[in-house]
Amino acid sequence: MTDKQPYVPLYEPNSREEEAELSLKHTKFSKGVPVFFVLILLLTILSESSVQMIADISASRAYQADSEQLPTRKLFRWVEFWQLGPPMEQVKSAKGFWEYWALLPQVSKISEYETGLEDDSIVGQALRPKAQQFLTNYLGAGNEQVFVGREGWLYYRPEVEYLTGRGFLTPDEQKKRLRSGIEAVQPDPIRAILQFQEQLKARGITLIVMPVACKPMTMSENLAWPAGMPEQPLQNDSYVEFEKKLQEAGVRVLDTTGVFWKAKMQSGSPEPTHLRTDTHWTPNVMQYTAGVLADYLKSNRLISAYPPVAYRTKQIKVSGEGDISLMLKLEDGGKSFPKQSVELQQVINPDGSLWIPDRQSPILLMGDSYSNIYSLGTMGWGESAGLGEQLSVRMKCPVDMIVINAGGSYASRQQLMKEMSRGEDRLAGKQVVIYEFAMRDLSSGDWKLFDLPKPKNAPPAAASTVAPVEVPAVTPAVVETSINTPVTGQIPAIASNPTVKVQTKPRLQKSNGVDKAEISKWPLRVQAVVKSVSATPKPGSVPYKDCLIALELSDIKAISGSLKAKRIVVFTYGMQDNRLAAASEMKPGARVTLELQPWSQVEARYGGLNRVELDDPDALMLDTYWGVLK
Amino acid sequence: MVFSSHIFVYYFLPIALTIIYALYKAPQRWRNFALIILGYIFYGWANPKFIFLMFGTTFLDWLLSLIIATDSWHPIRGSHSNIVPLAKGPRTKTQRIALVLSVVSNLTMLGFFKYFNFGVDSYNSLMQTLGLSQYVAHDFLRVVLPLGISFYTFQSLSYIIDVYRGDAKAMRNFTDFSCFVSMFPHLVAGPILKFSYLADQLENRTLTLDKFARGSAFFCLGMAKKILLANPCGKVADTVFNAGHISTVDSWIGVFGYSFQIYFDFSGYSDMAIGLGLMLGFVFARNFDNPYRSQSITEFWRRWHISLSTWLREYLYIPLGGNRKGKVRTYVNLLLTMLLGGLWHGASWNYVIWGAIHGGMLAFERSLGKKGPYMGLPPILRVVITYIVVLITWVFFRSADLGASVHFVGTMFGFGSHAASVSLLSGLLLKPYYIICMLISAVVVWKLPDTWDFTQKLTWPKALACVVLLWLALVVLATQEYNPFIYFIF
């Protein structure tokens, strides 16, 4: 090495340092190598920001020339690091040490900024699918969400870890999960379920808990080594204790693991219980489970007399792309893991319209995407053929649903709490609540506790004894119908609860306190200031491709019509088809223009999608709308 | 911020290099000042609040070092312009008090942030064991560990002790001293630099093409080690160590994976640190030297995390008496040094046991002498035995708690419990990607030259190999969300 200044050590170096100096002095380079290294390194580290700068300028010009060409990413994010700091007004108005201290950039904001830079990187976006394709196709590697199995089977990592991990009720696991995230997590599912059980019991409603078995539990043969059919389904170490504790406390539990296993093994060759590249159950297993559930409700006389509704079913064929394959984000889209076709039994109302949930039903199904699949069209697997529909057919009575994707551990209960707190008694007339959630939530879900308003007149409890749900020895009668064939059957057993008036057509949700007379026409166009925004999940990191986020709006000015409310909550797409939507970039303080509709008008369409609520509990009490950014 | 991140490689590093090279002809102090600003941004990126802590401790140590050097409680006043290293010999009361204040303040801060939660947890466990659950402090304050606190505290301590001993002169200029502490290449994970060596470079270093070129080679190889080997091996280790039930074979796969992960993770980071140091004109000493080729634990500690073992030897083992006070005292000193070395890593009984096993082995090997029966074994067998001992200690280092460690070691030797989910775990591990990564890791560990030797002579094929590996690592980095850094938390 040829330092320009002579090396004059001030202190005697010891041997390690001396060795380093000597080694560096005696580095030998082939001719041209040092220049090559410098050029290549500089080229590499400057490539990303240069490409990004050029692409952002280009996209910005295209947008300026044609406002229809909306950029697909946040432009010039790389120069916006200064936004991590507080606004100047806050700095000027701060007084005292602690107020200044609170203005320091938040760790979460820094992390969000860094993640945004990575996600919006043009180079990264070009490289990621290609690299993942190679890793998956040639090396059998998945990613942080996906395990790649044999013969085209894909598995969702949290579901596999539910089985390979430690018992979810062990004190160490509970402690670990309690401190796992930035926000506090309530890791104990038993506590949340027992609280819910008490709340329902006070209203005379029977709770049936239905944890749904995940794919690796009953379909492990395509992932396990050595390959081969296991003798029994796999289960987490704590599950038996979980079920036992619930039953001891009087909670009815339908263990779907056994149901699925029976469904799988009932014919000569094992039938898949789950979709090949998707987290969810097959239509056959879902229908089989609905049959078991209906048999249980009937045999235990949990529903009072109900005039039978002559639903019809229609055999339809749909093909869908698996949510797990989408998480891999491969270059060839669905070619490596092609779409899967399934046959569904779509349920049709007596008037010929497609089945939709009915709030007047004595049965409330609360659940997650297992209840939504085949029911909610936006999931891409058909509609009006899901668990609620199949149960409805078998019970010959309507079913009410509060179903939110990925909402098993708390979102559906939170939605119920929201409605009840706003004075909408969603539990009025209910006799049974079926609480469905994916079993993986037992080890990874946040089992938040919610207070429900106390009932005014508590009726006597519907069931005083506990009967664990047993898997029937024989196959339940799966309704096999064709187009225009009415389903008939016996009226369910009569219980002591008062009869509920039948309403075959579901009514629209009450309009959340909004005086419709004030509003001439929906949708209503408004301008408002964003007060707060809920977080958007990272596309591809969650087992769903659409997600609604909540915007709290203030300073609302109606452009068309009128709106009295000073503050409202608006749900809109934060992520659509695994891409971030414009609302995900909203920051508090931004002025926006939206077209609003009362949430109740769109609930049937969007209510099943995953929704991220605002952190502020007061926001839960505000009027809720559906909004489209303009 | 970590070196193997998108924001560091594509944004922070280009900006840092531009600033430093723009100051090519500027006075050294300006470059030092620029490095301080860059260091604080680098450090504050993880949590801006902790930059005040680092600034506070840096300022206090600087002030106390001047008090020691000038033997005066008013060191900044004009009469002390010529500061020279102290002569050997006894120190005054003022100097002793200043030293004690510095050592106590540094260790108190380290102790608070590092061991407070451990103390509360241990108290809670004790209360529960004694049946006094009502006294358990469930919602007591939880302390967040500032990044790299163990590293910069040890570096500050080395400075103050060197000044006190007369091995180094105190830095009159706060900028130079602050640069020594906050210099981003070694800030959060070392290597732990001896002040007496770096002081020279803070005042007298050069930026050269050769340094930059070799630094680039170090950086390329370090990045490749981290992304291409440490991360997939880490995935294997995490899968096994987080599992409820494992088979004997899987337990060995898991601990092999962890041994590769921790080596490539830390040595890769050290390589990148050395490379970045060179690009900025600094020369850092070697931190790893093929540790898994060691034939004894004594040799292992001459090759593994050399900057820590050197620090422990110079500032702990030798002051305790080293080997100067008889055999028994030597063994006790070795054990004590490694116990404290274990505790330096973190507050957990697992680290204590990890340190105790290493300390015990060092003492045991010393008792065997250079001509004992162990030394008569073939070298390859000694390498295997040493590696197995190191593997067992890694189990304690990696496991969540003591019970899990004991269970894991039991499983390695066939005493584990079995469950149906074991086959699922095996299926996750036996993927071509993981198998290939583990095999390549083994070849690199036992067959290929390490970064230091590989870059001693940089020919065109080697240069091309370095660049290809860097690009490959950056492509894989773009796909990986899993990118932990083990020593980030120490």
Image: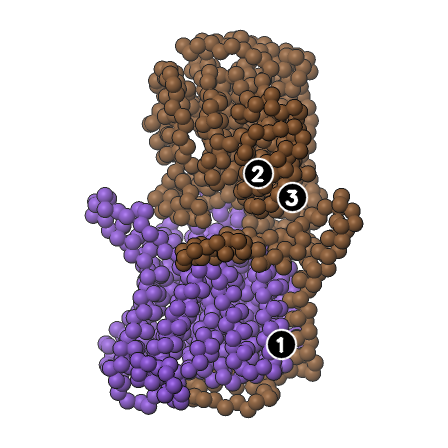
SS of the residue under disc 1: helix
Task: Give the CA distance from mark 3 to mark 2.
Answer: 21 Å
Nearest-to-viewer mark from 3 and 2: 2
Q: Which subunit holds the residue at mark 2?
A: A
- Residue matched to label 1: B22
Q: Which subunit holds the residue at mark 3?
A: A
Task: Give the CA distance from mark 1 to mark 3.
Answer: 40 Å
Q: Tell me which residue sits at (43%, 89%) in the image.
A: A12
Q: Which mark is residue A582?
A: 3
Chain drawn in purple? B
Q: Tell me which residue sits at (65%, 47%) in the image.
A: A329
All told, the count of numbered labels is 3
Nearest-to-viewer mark from 1 and 2: 2
Q: Taking the image as drawn, is residue A438 in sight? A: no
Quick one: label 3 or label 2, which is nearer the N terminus? 2
- Residue matched to label 2: A555
SS of the residue under disc 3: helix
Neighbour tally class for label 3: few under 14, some 14-19, many 20 plus, Cα within 10 Å: some
Neighbour tally class for label 2: few under 14, some 14-19, many 20 plus, Cα within 10 Å: some
Q: Quadrant of residue B410?
A: bottom left
Chain drawn in brown? A
Q: Amino acid at mark 3?
A: Ala
In the rendered structure, the answer to whether residue B332 lies left or right of residue A103 reads left
Quadrant of the frame with the C terminus of chain A: top right
